[in-house]
Amino acid sequence: MKTVSVCFVCLGNICRSPTAEGVMLKRVAEAGLDGRIVVDSAGTGDWHVGAAPDARAQRAASRRGYDLSGLRARQIAAGDFGRFDLVLAMDDANLGALRRLCPPELRDRVRLLMAFAPDAREREVADPYYGGEAGFEAVLDQCEAACAGLLEGLRGRLSD
């Protein structure tokens, strides 16, 4: 059985990328594709390795039915580029960092998450860390839109 793997990446892996991971895990489960689509997240920085997602991200996610409590921050590793079919950055700064770390022959796997949101006006998922609760809600809106488009795209890969 064919599988597809995706890793979401932000700076510290405590706000945006675990939110995207939580949203995608739920979408995958609802689609009956557990075991066919592997989902993970990481950060380009190492400041929060081992930490749970930001409490504000967890609260916002919980209000929408996503459970981020079991997720723990980790830093992207060189082996991740070969392990994942897609490595999806939340913003251009992290996209650039990933492209610098990624072996040249695998760079086509590194993309922006919002490229999968068909009607998005924003190119990046804004970092909510230094803002208030509304920023975490906006991240959820963006991740829900992008993950819906991503899931549709991955269904095609599974049937190839």
Image (cartoon, grey):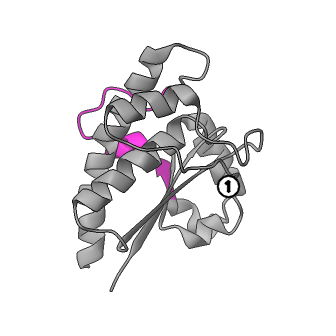
Please tell me which residue is depicted at 48% across the width and 44% down the height of the picture.
68
Majority SS type along the magenta span: loop
53 sits left or right of 31 in the view = right
Please tell me which residue is depicted at 52% across the width and 67% down the height of the picture.
84
Please tell me which residue is depicted at 38% across the width and 55% down the height of the picture.
25
Q: Which residue is mark 1?
A: 76
Question: Residue 33: percent from the left, percent from the top?
Answer: 28, 68
Q: How many marks?
A: 1
31 sits left or right of 76 in the view = left
Q: Is residue 125 visible?
A: no
Location of the C terminus (image quadrant): bottom left
What's the amino acid at mark 1? Ile
Location of residue 146 (image quadrant): top left
Along the viewing direction, whichever of 9 and 71 lies nearer the viewer? 71
Question: Residue 116: percent from the left, percent from the top?
Answer: 33, 46
Q: Most extreme residue toward the right, as rendered?
A: 47
38 sits left or right of 45 in the view = left
Along the viewing direction, whichever of 8 and 81 lies nearer the viewer? 8
Location of the N terminus (image quadrant): bottom left
Question: Residue 51: percent from the left, percent from the top?
Answer: 68, 42
106 sits left or right of 66 in the view = right
Please tell me which residue is depicted at 28% across the width and 74% down the height of the picture.
158
Magenta residue span = 110-127
Q: Is residue 22 visible?
A: yes
Q: Is residue 1 above or below residue 3?
A: below
